[in-house]
Every structure is written in structure tokens, then in C-alpha cells.
Image (cartoon, rainbow, N blue to C red):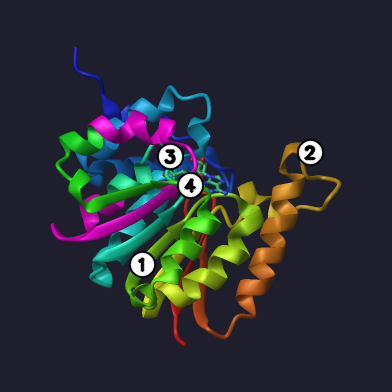
Amino acid sequence: MERDLKKIPSPSKGLLSSEELYEYILETSVYPREPEPLKELRHVTANHPRALMATAPDAGQIISMLLQLVNAKNTIEVGVFTGYSLLLTALSIPEDGKITAIDMNRESYEIGLPIIKKAGVEHKIDFIESEALPALDRLLKDPSNEGNFDFAFIDADKVNYWNYHERLMKLVKVGGIVVYDNTLWGGSVAMSEEDTPEFRKQGRQLTIEFNRLIAADPRVHISLAPYGDGITICRRIS
Ligand SMILES: C[S@@+](CC[C@H](N)C(=O)[O-])C[C@H]1O[C@@H](n2cnc3c(N)ncnc32)[C@H](O)[C@@H]1O
């Protein structure tokens, strides 16, 4: 029997006023337009014990639109997991586009890889199994990489977001876009310390600090948008 992949639950990260409202957005606007390979990858990832790590489909939809709006061809991804955001990037950039995808865990990438191959987009991906900071520093050692990227998506360890940002301000061209995931951290950024569940406390502090720094950074225009777990869209302006 054919599975109805539209029905796989994507848990709300709690930012909207009700689960029903989030479901409404997914059911009316996201799932009907989600490419089949992405549905399949979302389904495969749903069985993973850390399935919640995957980029939310509604965030994916706007990221795909941004990629196409800026005609992104050469992109960076930090934090691949099973590859939802990676596959959506690969499906959104042209045939000769390239994604430098960095994750220290190749095992999870391999869960999604058969679907990426079946979708015919593996040739666009250069997967680097590494800690992200040294990998970005290696890219920066080659001067031809400076300003050579049109787009970057960052979805890894929050403790390094500002370190990634400093490197991306050299790698991504002026006019290019950098998107940071989880910048509302389950809504905890607006909670008091006492009301914040223990497991969210450290991420909350790191996210608040990152949001403060990026809001004061004159090198970028920004928009913190409540898709998924919150995404901050930056456009490099200098
Ligand atoms: C939230 S998940 C990424 C989700 C992914 N964007 C998706 O759509 O499924 C975070 C990923 O970052 C990776 N990661 C965490 N810290 C890292 C680091 N310092 N260097 C490289 N990868 C890291 C983890 O291995 C994990 O796969």
C-alpha cells in the first residue's frame, strides 16, 4: 500500500500560538509543494532518534525560494544530518551548481544519500566530513574562495555560530545570503531563565547572545523570521 507521505508529522517547535496553526501552514502551503524526494527524506528521517534536528519543512520552503531569488550557484552548508536542507538546496540550484557541505558525522548523511542519488543531484555535493571551523578555515586558505559563495546555510553547534559568521563574512560575496537556523530556540529566547526547561538553558543563552551580536552587525541586513525553529536571514552588504 502506498504511504501518504504528506501525513508524516513534523512536530511544531512551539513558536506559533497553536499546533493547529502550524499544521494548517504545513498542510495548505508546504506539503502540497514539497518535492517528492524531500518528502521521502523527511519520512526516512522521522524514524531517526534525533529526527527533530532536521530543518523544518516550512523553513526549507523559504530557503529554497531565497536560493532561487539570488540565483545561488555556489553554496555552503554547515550541519547536514540526514540531508533535508542539503537535498532541498541541491534541488534549488542549477545543474552545474555546487554545495560545499560540512558535517563531522558522515553516518547520518549516508541515511539520506540514496535518496539524494535517486533524485540525480549528488554531483552537486562536495561532502566534507570534518569539524566545521577548520573546514571553513581551509577554504579561506585559498584566496580564490573569498567572496566566491552566493549562499550559506548554517545549522550546527550554536556555540560556534559567531565564529562561523566571521568566516562567512569573507567567503560569501557582498549581496549574498547567509541563513542561520534555530535562532528562536524553541521560543525559549523570550522565556525567563526560571521558566526555561533545563535542556534548553545553554542553547537559549548562546542563541540570545548570537541574536544580539548579529542585530548589531553593520555588515549585514537581517530578518529573524519565525519559520520552523526561527531562521535569521542575513544579506551581506559590506
Ligand atoms: C541540526 S543538525 C542539521 C540538520 C540539517 N540541516 C537537516 O536539514 O537535516 C546539526 C548537524 O550539525 C553537525 N555538527 C554539530 N556540530 C558540528 C561541528 N562542530 N562541526 C561539524 N558539524 C557539526 C551534527 O553532526 C549534525 O548532523
Report the residue at 64% width, 67% height from top: 211
Question: Which quarter of the image is occupied by the N terminus?
Answer: top left
Q: Is residue 75 above or below residue 103?
A: below
Inter-mark Cα distance, 4 to 2: 29 Å
Tags 3 and 1 in contact by the CB under 8 Å rule?
A: no
Q: Which mark is residue 57?
A: none
Q: Which mark is residue 151?
A: 1
Report the residue at 76% width, 52% height from top: 191
Inter-mark Cα distance, 1 to 2: 34 Å
Q: Is residue 7 above or below residue 18?
A: above
Is label 3 in a helix, a strand or a loop? helix
* Magenta segment includes 93: yes
Choose the circle earlier in sequence order: 4 or 2: 4
Tags 3 and 2 in contact by the CB under 8 Å rule?
A: no
Inter-mark Cα distance, 3 to 4: 36 Å
Residue 131 falls left or right of residue 194: left
Query: From this viewpoint, which residue is outermost toward the right?
Result: 194
Is label 2 in a helix, a strand or a loop? helix
Is label 1 in a helix, a strand or a loop? strand
- Label 2: how many Cα within 10 Å (few below 14, some 14–19, many 20+): few
Report the residue at 50% width, 52% height from top: 155
Residue type beneath disc 1: Phe
Residue type beneath disc 3: Glu
Which tag is nearer the camera, tag 3 or tag 1?
1
Residue marked by disc 3 = 23
Choose the circle earlier in sequence order: 3 or 4: 3
Residue type beneath disc 4: Ser
What span is colored magenta in the figure? 89-114
Inter-mark Cα distance, 3 to 1: 29 Å
Which tag is nearer the camera, tag 4 or tag 2?
4
